[in-house]
Image: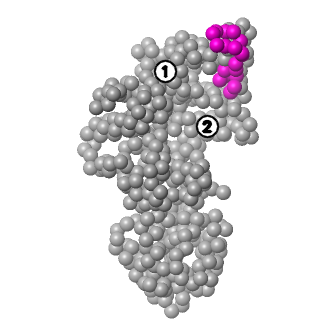
């Protein structure tokens, strides 16, 4: 079963026909909302996104023609409408086609043909659901995902680049899934910027009993834990120079040596590294080893920021809402249609991570079944189309500053907790705070 389904709005006052169509649509895999009056449907269509609407022309409170005409006059985007009509109302159906309706069926009709028509319109509306993407529906993310099966057949080291929060780890996990179709091999993720140099060595390579104070037993490091699977080294640009030398040796020799150990231990795994930094520039500045750069840069995957792939924003939001409902064991919440534009207009300096924070916060602070723009944003974000493109850099900087300040408040301005919350290293957080003039004590 898909975590996300095509949604159909069914407007039919006939109990027998309505129940039959609703049941058949559900069996065919569609999410169907059935309404018995035009008024109920009008409210739902104003609040929820539907891929297709099926409406009888004759309804108890107003006709389907009146409903469709009023909705079109409202100026909001509508799903494709298919009308059901009796023989005597064909003229009205023809008028509706001229107004922009998609099609009409005359009773009695072939339900199978209706289902085929609905499915074709849904696929046209949201083609990504037919292919079940896991990373995004934008052209950039679909192209990136299409490369993964081919890369999975190689043991080459992969470098994933992109801003903080764009989903670099999700790309690494998707690559791992392509290589490990049996779902039996380990995926181990390490944030290189979150550990001190001494801790990083012991965590990566493991240690023998008695190797240092507190080493009361031997411990396998991340390389050994990932044997046969994938080791994901996030923020590789934060790795200290001495550790860069040791990592280079492991890549070259395909073996590690535990801290305090004497015997080399062979390791077989896929190494995926990630960074938000410009490693080539760091090589030129002498802060990152050139030989290591070329060793990890065999295959390069770049993940664009969320503001450059707006098609993914609502898709990701819907996936987060699906996942949250499943994890909490609660009814699934939805987004009000008027909340979509602010989500699309906001530049998301924190990328996917910030989007998830915004939705998580709204789900905690409100019990509403349908989330509005006011529920999502503490203050209404300015629309990008109102910003001078020459000032876009300043706009993004202001948004990033506000994002960091919210995270600091959320974590009582504790640096370690805030950095972990944002998914960046403490060093990176300090740099951003200094750049934006944010003090640790606030104000």
In this picture, residue 203 sits left or right of residue 77: right
| Residue 380 visible (yes or no) | yes
Whole-number angstrom distance, CA of label 1 to CA of label 2: 21 Å
**138 and 334: which one is in front?**
334
Q: Residues within 10 Å of mark 2 (few under 14, many from 20)?
A: some
State the mark number for residue 238. 1
Q: Bounds of the magenta span?
A: 209-226
**Residue 213 is a magenta residue:** yes
Q: Report the quarter where the C terminus lies.
A: top left
Query: Relative to 36, does residue 3 appear above or below in the rendering?
Result: above
Query: Relative to 346, does residue 233 appear above or below in the rendering?
Result: above
Count of labels in the image? 2
**Residue 189 is a magenta residue:** no
* x, y percent for residue 198: 56, 13
In this picture, residue 295 sits left or right of residue 403: right
| Residue 109 visible (yes or no) | no
| Location of residue 273 by image quarter | top right
State the mark number for residue 43. none
**377 and 432: which one is in front?**
377
* x, y percent for residue 382: 30, 48
Query: Relative to 296, does residue 134 appear above or below in the rendering?
Result: below
What residue is shown at x 64% (from left), y 13% (from top)? 214
Mark 1, secondary structure of its residue: helix
Residue position marked by numbered label 2 in the rendering: 173
């Amino acid at each position: 079963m898909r975590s996300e389904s095509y949604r159909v709005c069914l407007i039919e006052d006939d109990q027998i026909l309505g129940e039959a169509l609703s049941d058949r649509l559900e069996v065919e895999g569609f999410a169907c909302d059935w309404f018995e009056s035009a008024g109920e449907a009008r409210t739902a269509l104003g609040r929820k996104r539907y891929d297709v609407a099926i409406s009888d022309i004759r309804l108890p409170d107003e006709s389907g023609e009146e409903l469709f005409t009023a909705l079109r006059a409202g100026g909001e985007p509508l799903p494709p409408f298919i009308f059901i009509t009796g023989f005597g109302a064909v003229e009205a159906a023809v008028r509706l086609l001229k107004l922009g309706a998609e099609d009409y069926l005359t009773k009695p009709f072939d339900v199978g043909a209706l289902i085929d028509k609905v499915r074709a319109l849904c696929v046209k509306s949201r083609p990504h659901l037919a292919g079940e993407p896991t990373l995004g529906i934008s052209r950039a993310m679909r192209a990136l995902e299409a490369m993964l099966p081919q890369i999975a057949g190689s043991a080459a080291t992969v470098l994933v680049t992109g801003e903080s929060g764009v989903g670099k780890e999700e790309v690494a996990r998707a690559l791992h899934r392509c290589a490990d179709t049996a779902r039996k091999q380990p995926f181990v993720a390490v944030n290189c910027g979150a550990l001190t140099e001494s801790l990083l060595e012991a965590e990566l390579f493991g240690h023998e009993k008695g190797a240092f104070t507190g080493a009361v037993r031997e411990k396998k490091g991340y390389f050994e834990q990932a044997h046969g699977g994938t080791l994901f080294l996030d923020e590789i640009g934060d790795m200290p120079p001495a550790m860069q030398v040791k990592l280079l040796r492991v890549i070259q020799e395909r073996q590690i040596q535990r801290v305090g150990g004497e015997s080399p231990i062979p390791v077989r795994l896929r190494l995926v590294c990630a960074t938000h930094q410009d490693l080539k520039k760091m090589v030129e500045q002498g802060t990152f080893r050139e030989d290591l750069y070329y060793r990890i840069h065999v295959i390069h995957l770049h993940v664009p920021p969320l503001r450059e792939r707006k098609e993914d924003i609502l898709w990701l939001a819907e996936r987060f809402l699906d996942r949250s409902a499943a994890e909490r064991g609660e009814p699934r919440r939805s987004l009000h249609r008027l909340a979509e534009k602010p989500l699309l207009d906001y530049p998301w300096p924190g990328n996917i991570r910030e989007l998830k924070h915004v939705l998580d916060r709204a789900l905690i602070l409100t019990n509403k079944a349908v989330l509005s723009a006011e529920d999502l944003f503490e203050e209404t974000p300015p629309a990008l189309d109102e910003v001078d493109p020459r000032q876009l850099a300043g706009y993004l900087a202001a948004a990033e500053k506000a994002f960091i300040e919210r995270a600091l408040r959320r974590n009582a301005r504790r640096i370690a907790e805030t950095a972990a919350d944002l998914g960046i290293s403490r060093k990176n957080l300090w740099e951003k705070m200094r750049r934006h003039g944010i003090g640790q004590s606030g104000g």
